[in-house]
Image: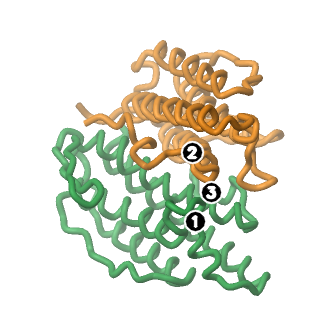
Chain colours: A green, B orange
Amino acid sequence: MPISMSSASLPVFQTMLGNLSHMLDKAQAFVDAKGCDPVALTQYRLAPDMLPFTRQVLIACDAAKNGVARLSGVEAPKFADDEQTLAELKARIAKTLAYLATVPAQTLDGTEAKDITFPVGKDSVRTMQGEAYLKQWVLPNMFFHIVTAYNILRHNGVDLGKKDYLLGAAA
Amino acid sequence: MPISMSSASLPVFQTMLGNLSHMLDKAQAFVDAKGCDPVALTQYRLAPDMLPFTRQVLIACDAAKNGVARLSGVEAPKFADDEQTLAELKARIAKTLAYLATVPAQTLDGTEAKDITFPVGKDSVRTMQGEAYLKQWVLPNMFFHIVTAYNILRHNGVDLGKKDYLLGAAA
């Protein structure tokens, strides 16, 4: 079957968010084993002007959720963004995956040339065609925040490797 | 035009490797301004058992080069992997982009169901179909190493932001 806008998006979001959820399990195991304050991990930043771990997870989820919603032209559910603990972050990923499972593939297919207007930063918007929006904006953003979450955990000593990041890749 | 294996791969590799080259310019400007030993940056690791910055750049390049070569069924050029300086890493990206520019789109198109066998680690191989190989292996790998390179630079104080990472995204 030829590649399509739905096959280029949904399975990638689902695999990578599933892998992120798996990384959170390993982060929880690390906190439990060390007996350390989990906030030291969930609020960790790689630089003072980068976002903390919690926000990396939330934005990875929203990149997928909002990307799919904008392409398919339906309103995305809004979440309160009040997750703090690793368990709450896992629940946020689960809610995002549950939403993705409700989006019919045919609402994404054929959106290659559709104009998508989306917010950039706090005060501006940008318009890209659907295919470029997916490939050059949504996917790079989702990967950015998942890999940054991974790097924060690795930098703090959580037992992770590339195989955890690529866990759900299916043939 | 419908999305295709070539449009889902080449422009993404080209944009992201171009952005990585731009980040290297900012890393060079940082080293020049600080007067610090550039090796402190190029050999920096986010964890003792992670790869240093130089290897992040080389593997990002090779993810794109080898991914395209395996999908299209042509032999990829082999490079010596002896880059050390930021200038040499920039040249490696340029060589990779020059190679990508020689790959005809039609050698990638239609490879969705083609079996691709590729090395995993030092001692094993894996086979995935072309579309899954691109979406679930090549792209996640390329993004992993570009974002980790970005995070190493950010963690060390290089003046970078999300706009640098997404620089070349075109509508």
The answer to whether residue A118 is seen in the rendering is yes
Whether marks 2 and 1 lie on the same chain:
no
Q: Which mark is residue A45?
A: 1
- Between the C-alphas of marks 3 and 2, the distance is 26 Å
Q: Mark 1: which amino acid?
A: Arg
Say left or right for B137 vs A156.
Answer: left
Residues at badges 3 and 2 in contact (C-beta under 8 Å)?
no
Return the chain for callout 3: A
- Percent x, y for residue B11? 40, 30
The answer to whether residue A19 is seen in the rendering is no
Q: Residue at x 46, y 69 (%)?
A: A55
Circle 2 is placed at which residue position? B158
Q: Residue at x 37, y 34 (%)?
A: B168
Q: Residue at x 59, y 31 (%)?
A: B28
Q: Residue at x 45, y 43 (%)?
A: B165
Residues at badges 1 and 3 in contact (C-beta under 8 Å)?
no
Q: Mark 2: which amino acid?
A: Val
Q: Nearer the viewer, mark 2 or mark 1?
A: 2
For the residue carrying disc 2, how many other residues have a C-alpha within 10 Å: few (<14), some (14-19), or many (20+)? many
- Between the C-alphas of marks 2 and 1, the distance is 15 Å
- Between the C-alphas of marks 1 and 3, the distance is 19 Å
Image quadrant of residue A152? bottom right
Q: Nearer the viewer, mark 3 or mark 2?
A: 2
For the residue carrying disc 3, how many other residues have a C-alpha within 10 Å: few (<14), some (14-19), or many (20+)? many
Return the chain for callout 1: A
Q: As displayed, is residue B66 above or below residue A8?
A: above
Q: Which element carries disc 2, helix, strand or loop? A: loop
Whether marks 3 and 2 lie on the same chain:
no
- Percent x, y for residue B1? 23, 31
Circle 3 is placed at which residue position? A165
Along the viewing direction, whichever of B44 and A88 lies nearer the viewer: B44
Return the chain for callout 2: B
